[in-house]
Image (cartoon, rainbow, N blue to C red):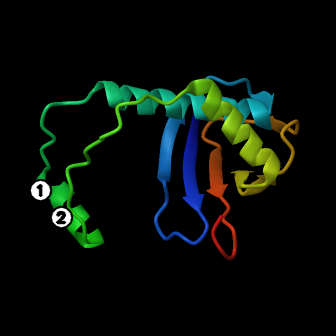
Amino acid sequence: MKLQLSAKALGKKKSFIDQVIIDLEIASESNVSELLTKLVLQQVNAFNKKKDNNTLFNFLSESTISQSAQSGSVKFNEQYNDNKADESKAVSTVLQAFEDGLIALFINDEPLEISSQKINLKESDNITVVRLTFLTGLL
């Protein structure tokens, strides 16, 4: 099933994931925890594949340099940590964060609040994940 995914954080102007179309193998009638699990597994697999495709030199194109210059920092996107993400740990972390209210999940601008809540997904539904932040202080 092809779905539109975007991930944002409160207080940030730029999105983590900016409206990408993903192909997710999920039943049309499922619950929130199944959706979060499938999303995390898909993102962890993409992250780990990117780690595997590490090249000796990372060359920057002209467009990449101009886009990076607008943010004020041009760099080679070097990854100094070669560790891959652990799927089971990532899934449990996201499910716990959802239960604790640290992330919010929306499907077509409708909020989902309980992990056992049933959802009916359709082709090209819009899924938005918002990372909520603390209002004051540091942990």
**Front-lying residue, 110 or 33:** 33
Left or right: 29 with respect to 5?
right
Check whether the beta carbons of the residues at disc 2 and disc 1 lie within 8 A of each other: yes
Rendered image quadrant of residue 91: top right
Rendered position, 59 above or below 111: above
Asked if 54 appears above or below 125 in the picture, the reply is above
Q: Where the N terminus falls, by quadrant?
A: top right
Q: Residue at x 55, y 51 (%)?
A: 6
In this rendering, is residue 110 above or below 34? below
At mark 1, the secondary structure is helix
Circle on res. 79? none
- Can you identify the residue that label 1 sits on? 62
Q: Secondary structure at mark 2?
A: helix
The answer to whether residue 118 is visible is yes
Point out residue 113 in the picture as x, y percentages from the top left corner: 84, 50
Which residue corresponds to the image point at 63% horizontal and 48% vertical from the top-left?
A: 126
Question: What x and y, as percent, mark residue 15?
Answer: 49, 60
Check disc 2 and give the amino acid type. Ser
As drawn, which residue projects farthest toward the front? 139
Q: Position of residue 74 (x, y in %)?
A: 20, 61
Which x, y percent locates residue 81?
35, 37
Task: State the residue position of label 2.
Answer: 66
Structural crowding at the residue carrying mark 1, measured as other residues with C-alpha within 10 Å and reported as few (<14), some (14–19) or many (≥20): few
**Quarter of the figure with the C terminus:** bottom right
Disc 1 residue type? Answer: Glu
